[in-house]
Amino acid sequence: MRVYCDASSLVSLSSSCLLNVLKMFPKTEFIIPKSVYKEAISAAEGIRKFKWNGLRIKELVDDNILKVSEALPEAQEFMNLSNNLFIHKNKGLKIIHLGEAECVGGLMRDKKGLLLVDERNTRMIIEAPEKLHEYLTNKLGKDIKINEHNLAALKDKVGWIPIIRSTELLALAYSLGFARNEEELEAALFSLKYAGCSITFEEIEEYIRIL
Amino acid sequence: MNAEVIKAIEEEDSRKLREISERVFDKAVLDQNKQEVERAILYYAVSKILGKVHFKKEKQWETFKSKLIEYLEQKKDIPEILKHVTEFDREYGNYLGNVVQKARMKYASTAYAFGLSLSTACELTGADLTEVSAYVGQTKIHEKPFTQTRSVRERLKNARKLLEEES
């Protein structure tokens, strides 16, 4: 099984000192596209405040737990579709970045696997683009049109992609023995939320109930 | 617009400048105009400085302000004015992170709340991903009900596909 990792998840896991979660899945291939490497590692290396965060992720690359992948043409296809999905003044709103697109591009090529992404908007483009459109229109109070052709193409090409966040990875790792008890699990879930994972308090509470 | 900004600085009206900044940013984010985003960041950073009493007690305060106004009147390039603001903040501010970085982070978070992906928001504003991610985590952005696109059970089911391969 391949899991394409977006920078947002690697950053939340690193900030919460939970990158070791990845080591709980030795048969899984965690893929980090080149652009994500640049965002999560190279960019952080140039900033004293975040260098340690980046180095911790780099260690996983060095240990071959995270495998760096090349850019694929599918990434550009996803970017073109997403960044011309919402139209304002006859111009597409650029919503998706190359890093996120390279993750999705890998899945489009493989036609199987999982996407690990903590940020909200890439997830919504894949799972509920109409909801994001409604939200954008309300939030910005402007006339933002949706490109029906791109909407249909996105649903067809990426609508099937199963998405998990760092919190789901942690929950699974818990069932494999990561964290000693429920209290530690709960604390780690909250730590990921505060580090930027797009999960609600309600969802965390549900996790605690069902796990 | 420029006259409005200069007036707000002359009158040390932090709130007014913040309002102008937000107005500029809201338009710039929709037009995806990086130059205007930089302008919004500049106004926000200056509004933060105007709002802090300790800066005004500094001997260099009036010099800083008059040079800032001069730059705006001359319509100097935004990066040059940002440098002037950063240098003043670095010298007299109380925090290790400078006020321009904070402005970038704040607006990256706003752009993300508007619907841009986190990385796109960082690219547009020049903010750092790690910093913005942590900042967003302290806000209520992810608490909005519409963001729950799948149930926890369904997402866990997806994740369990990993376990099937592990066993």
Image (spheres, rainbow, N blue to C red):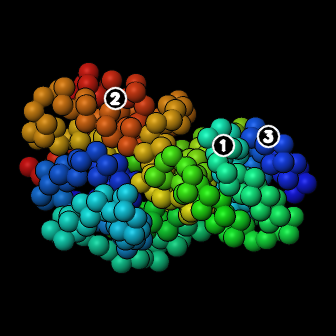
Q: Is residue A82 left or right of residue A107?
A: right
Of all chains, the one bearing label 1 is: B
Q: What residue is shown with label 2? A: A204
Disc 3 marks which amino acid?
Answer: Asp
The answer to whether residue B129 of the structure is visible from this angle is yes
Label 1 secondary element: loop
Q: Which of labels 1 and 3 is toward the front? A: 1
Q: CA distance from mark 1 to mark 3?
A: 16 Å
Q: Is residue A156 left or right of residue A182?
A: right
Q: CA distance from mark 2 to mark 3?
A: 43 Å
Q: Residues within 10 Å of mark 1 (few under 14, many from 20)?
A: few
Q: What residue is shown with label 1? A: B57
Tell which of A164 and A202 is nearer to you. Answer: A202
Of all chains, the one bearing label 2 is: A
First of labels 1, 3 by sequence position: 3
Q: Residue at x 20, y 41 (%)?
A: A172
